[in-house]
Amino acid sequence: MKAKTSGLLSEEVRDVAAGGDAAPEAGTDVENPYWADPPPHPCPEKGCIRRGLCCSSSPGWFAPGEIEAAAALLGLAPDAFVRTYCVIDAWDLPEGRVEVFAPLKLARDGSPALPPLSRADGWYRLLRGACVFFEGGGCRIYAARPAECRAYLCTNPPEQNLSHEQLARRWREGS
């Protein structure tokens, strides 16, 4: 049976049910046509004004050593924190695959899009979903939010924000 291309996603994304290719691999960026450009920032010179646009579309990755601070903020042990609130994502560097922790994304109904501690796949990466810590228009762990969230500024061009590759290198180096 010939694999069908999806009219909803790019030509490279195949209909898995029709025997096509699997979801996009870790370490690859695939354009998601459902991610609309955010409305213009009302005052770019102010930097982040906590509109929540980034928090409501996809959580940022933690850097090494950050899980402990986020867990402490919620009164949890790090193990309980990751077993409750995180997925394992990955990035392929030339030196090999690096796995990282990221907050869960929520599905439209507010439930986790994957069970905690699941390994994210390409489809999960394409999914637009609010961060599990985004509540009432703000971040529950703002004081200990992930490195990617702290560094991200919606008014920056993408190359000026912290990339998944840069975070994967931090995990590889342990810093």
Image (tube, grey):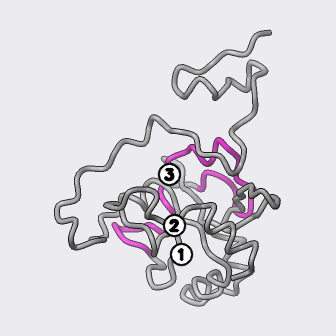
In the rendered image, residue 152, in percent from the top left (x then y), is placed at: 43, 67
* The disc label shown at residue 167, or none: none
Q: Main secondary structure of the magenta part?
A: loop
10 Å crowding of disc 2: few (<14), some (14-19), many (20+): some
Q: What residue is shown at x 63% (from left), y 76% (from top)?
A: 63
Q: Is residue 113 magenta?
A: yes
10 Å crowding of disc 1: few (<14), some (14-19), many (20+): some
The answer to whether the residues at label 1 and label 2 have Cβ atoms under 8 Å apart is yes
Q: Quadrant of residue 73?
A: bottom right
Which residue range is magenta in the image?
112-139
Q: Earlier in the sequence, mark 3 or mark 2?
A: 3
- Which residue has dot 3 on it? 129
In the rendered image, residue 106, in percent from the top left (x then y), is placed at: 54, 55
**Image-based side of 67 in relation to 36, left or right:** right
Badge nearest the viewer, 1 or 3: 1
Q: Is residue 50 magenta?
A: no
Q: What residue is shown at x 59% (from left), y 21% (from top)?
A: 6
**Image-based side of 73 in relation to 91, left or right:** left
10 Å crowding of disc 3: few (<14), some (14-19), many (20+): many
Q: Amino acid at mark 1?
A: Ala
* The disc label shown at residue 147, or none: 1
Q: Earlier in the sequence, mark 1 or mark 3?
A: 3
For the C terminus, the quadrant is bottom right
73 versus 102 height, above or below: below
The answer to whether the residues at label 3 and label 2 have Cβ atoms under 8 Å apart is no
